[in-house]
Image: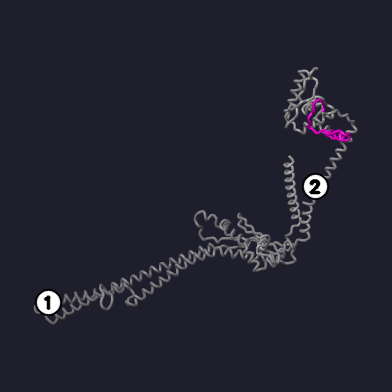
Amino acid sequence: MTTKPRVKKFRIRRGKATPVDAPDAPQAPPAAEAEREVALQAISQEGLTGRQLRMARRVAQKHGLTVASDIDAIYQLRAAGIDPFQRNSVLELVTADDDKEKQGQPRVQLPEKVQKGGNAVSKAAPQTGSRQLAEVAAIQRDIARRRRRKLFLLFTRLSFFVFLPTFMVGWYYFTMATPMFATKSEIVIQQAQSQQAAPGLSSLFQGTSMATQQDSIAVQSYLASREAMLRLDADHGFKAHFSDPEIDEIQRLPDDATNEDAFDLYMDHVRISYDPTEGIIRMDVIAADPQKSAEFSDALIGYAEEQVDQLTSRLRADQMSGARESYEEAERRRAEALSELLRIQQDFQQIDVAAETSAQMAQISSLEAERQRLNLILQSRLNVARPSELQVQSLRDQIANIDELSAQLRAEMTSGTTAGTSLAARNTELRTAEEDYAFRTVLVQQALTQMETARIEANRQVRYLSQSVRPIAPDEATYPRAFENTILAFLIFSGIYLMISLTAAILREQVSS
């Protein structure tokens, strides 16, 4: 009994060929066998997927080829001049399986082990061309039916998630939404220019928007605050206006609305923006009545002007108060010095220090001159042989009186007497009072100059709010913009549906892989 050589077959595991047991086959010549092994090895390195390998086996089965593996099926199909991955061949495979099921034969599930001692693949009878065309037409009809069903499901989803919400939004804007009127205004905060430009880089920004940028931002923040909303409600009835039953329910403010609800509505209907390049504050006030909209806008501009004044009032008040206090203190001390000078003059009965001293010295000088004259006369009387005692004594008495009076006058100038202080002391005190008064007068002049400088600086710190665009009541409703809002709603719903669809498809792909 002769033993037949066994031919190795290959099974693909993740794109690689592994040998499996195959039924007995006639032995091929060594050269052909080597060439076949090389071809099989080259096919296994092509990186074919499992789906392609299963397709090749089914095509080989359709053409009645006996194959040992999926790679062998590709090899034999290519050797026979048949493309194993042709689309028409794939369509014919479906009809072949259906015919087998109708004939009661089990459907072959690939890849499938080849049993020893027999062939797992039986030859299939060749099909006629008309039958193939009928089967292809049936497959095409089935594909078209599935495509119509998918399109119908897609249209249903789009209608439910996109078209219906868009229609509801458009119906609201076109039929139910209450017309709203917007009043536009623009305000600019300006700074007073100083008479003399300040040195340094700070002078470069005077008169520009950068000089008042901080004030503009502060005003913008105030107008967008709850305080401004509460003032507007207290002065002009903001809540009562938007609680009007004529306004639709979506835009209407409930009767029992809290301040937070009113503030949210306020932020939606009062739109404030600041342009730092031009230094302009733009404000849009929206209301259900045009006159009310203009009234709200005028009130907010008034609040902004008060806020601008308040921002610099403390600085100006501090500057002026310090200078004014210094001036008042200097003026008070000057008045005290003047009162002290007047008291000294009244007490000493002396007005001019220099004149009083000069008069005293002139009197002493005249007495000295008289004394010298009397001395000369006395000397002439004593030079005679027999002077008159009576004349000599009289001259001596006059000289003694002059000396006593002169000594008294000198004593009054240098030292005090029982009657009062000395003339020198009185002169010193009076001169000190005069100098103190003169010094206080200089201080008053300096304080007055400082107060004037502070006043000029305070005026320079003043901010002025000017209206470049005044609020005027509109004669046509600005909102709602029905068409634009409907298109925007359609784009939003479409984007949401697209994101959800892509997310679901990615998750389904990840789960099924």
Q: Which mark is residue 483?
A: none
Q: Amino acid at mark 2?
A: Leu
Q: Depth check: 494 or 79 in front?
A: 79
Q: Residue furthest bottom?
A: 390
Q: Amino acid at mark 1?
A: Leu
In which quarter of the view is residue 400 placed? bottom left
Q: Is residue 413 above or below residue 181?
A: below
Q: Which mark is residue 154?
A: 2
In which quarter of the view is residue 351 placed? bottom left
Please, what secondary structure does the residue beneath circle 2 have?
Answer: helix
Residue 505 on image: x %, y %: 74, 44
Q: Is residue 117 magenta?
A: yes
Q: Is residue 480 above or below residue 23?
A: below
Q: Is residue 100 magenta?
A: yes
Nearest-to-viewer mark from 1 and 2: 2
Residue 226 on image: x %, y %: 63, 63
Which stretch did the figure color magenta? 90-119
Question: Dot 1, how many residues are within 10 Å of its Cα: few (below 14), some (14-19), or many (20+)?
Answer: some
Q: Residue furthest left?
A: 385
Distance from disc 1 to disc 2, alpha carbons, whole Å, reads 160 Å
Residue 138 lies left or right of residue 499; in this view the side is: right
Q: Is residue 225 visible?
A: yes
